Image (spheres, grey):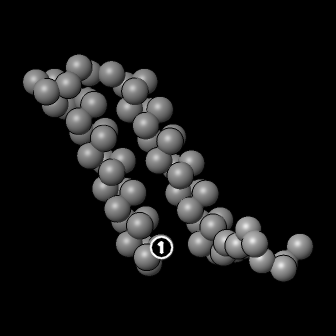
Amino acid sequence: MNFHFAAVLGAFMIVANLICETLLSIINAIDIMDAIYETVGIILVFICFYCVNSNGLIEINSDYE
């Protein structure tokens, strides 16, 4: 997967989450702290994804040590 596509998708998820948590009070209770926690979670996942994307993965049964 292209990292730029994943970054755009993550930004869309953050914006959609903030809209859902703040503006759509009909389908969801307004909760700013929940929106902040979800945004931080998305950012942490993308930091991990960036590290894996830049360094790659090592197979468990490989000869690399």
Q: Which residue is mark 1?
A: 3
Looking at the image, the residue that sits furthest to the front is 61
Q: Relative to residue 64, is residue 20 depicted above or below?
A: above
Q: Please identify the residue farthest to the right as the structure is shown.
A: 65
Q: Is residue 65 above or below residue 30?
A: below
Image point 19% across, 31% down: which residue? Answer: 23
Is residue 30 left or right of 44 when viewed as pictured?
A: left
Quadrant in the picture for residue 4: bottom left
Residue at 38% across, 72% down? 5
Give the total number of marks visible in the rendering: 1
Q: For this rendering, which residue is in front, 56 or 58?
A: 58
In the displayed structure image, the side of residue 14 where residue 59 appears, left or right: right
What residue is at 43 percent from the left and 24 percent from the top? 33
**Direction from residue 17 to residue 3 in the image, left or right:** right
Say if 36 sits above or below 55 in the image: above
Dot 1 amino acid type: Phe
Q: Nearer the viewer, residue 39 or 1?
A: 1
Query: Residue 7 in the image: x percent, y percent?
Result: 43, 65
Q: x, y (%) of residue 44?
A: 56, 48
Query: Which is more toward the observer, 14 or 1?
Result: 1
Q: Which quadrant would the N terminus be assigned to in this image?
A: bottom left
SS for callout 1: helix
Residue pictured at 89% horizontal, 73% vertical: 65
Local crowd size for mark 1, using a 10 Å CA cut-off: few (<14), some (14–19), many (≥20): few
**Picture coordinates of residue 50, whole percent (x, y):** 59, 66
